[in-house]
Amino acid sequence: MEPHVEYHKEGAVRFDKGYKRDGALAGYWEWLRKDGMKLRSGHFENGEQAGEWITYGAQGRKYKITQIKAKSK
């Protein structure tokens, strides 16, 4: 897997952690707010969201947890 980083237009890191495999999102990813606080995190399987996804409030606390079932091919 190759590490993948993108930035907000202001220069702050948008994706703190993330990988792509054959061009598709793979493994664990974290999205950050412009101030660096975590916004959302979860896993990808074959480019699709799967498993536990967490949304964080503005203070960095867990706000919502969603279970996403992996799509079968």
Image (tube, grey):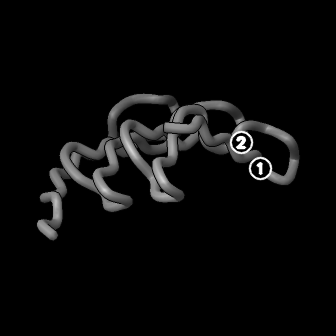
The answer to which of 57 and 42 lies nearer the viewer is 42
Q: Where does label 2 land, which residue? A: 34
- Identify the amino acid type marked 1: His
Contact, mark 1 vs mark 2 (Cβ under 8 Å): yes
Q: Which element type, helix, strand or loop, lies under badge 1? A: loop
Q: Which of the 4 image quarters holds residue 33?
A: top right
Any part of residue 56 in sight:
no
Q: Position of residue 27 (x, y in %)?
A: 37, 39
Separation of marks 1 and 2 at Cα, in angstroms: 7 Å
| Mark 2 crowd level (few <14, some 14–19, many ≥20, 10 Å Cα) | some
Mark sitting earlier along the chain (1/2)? 1
The answer to which of 33 and 27 lies nearer the viewer is 27
Q: Residue at x 59, y 35 (%)?
A: 3
The answer to whether 67 appears left or right of 20 in the picture is left
The answer to which of 10 and 1 lies nearer the viewer is 1
Callout in the foreground (1, 2) = 1
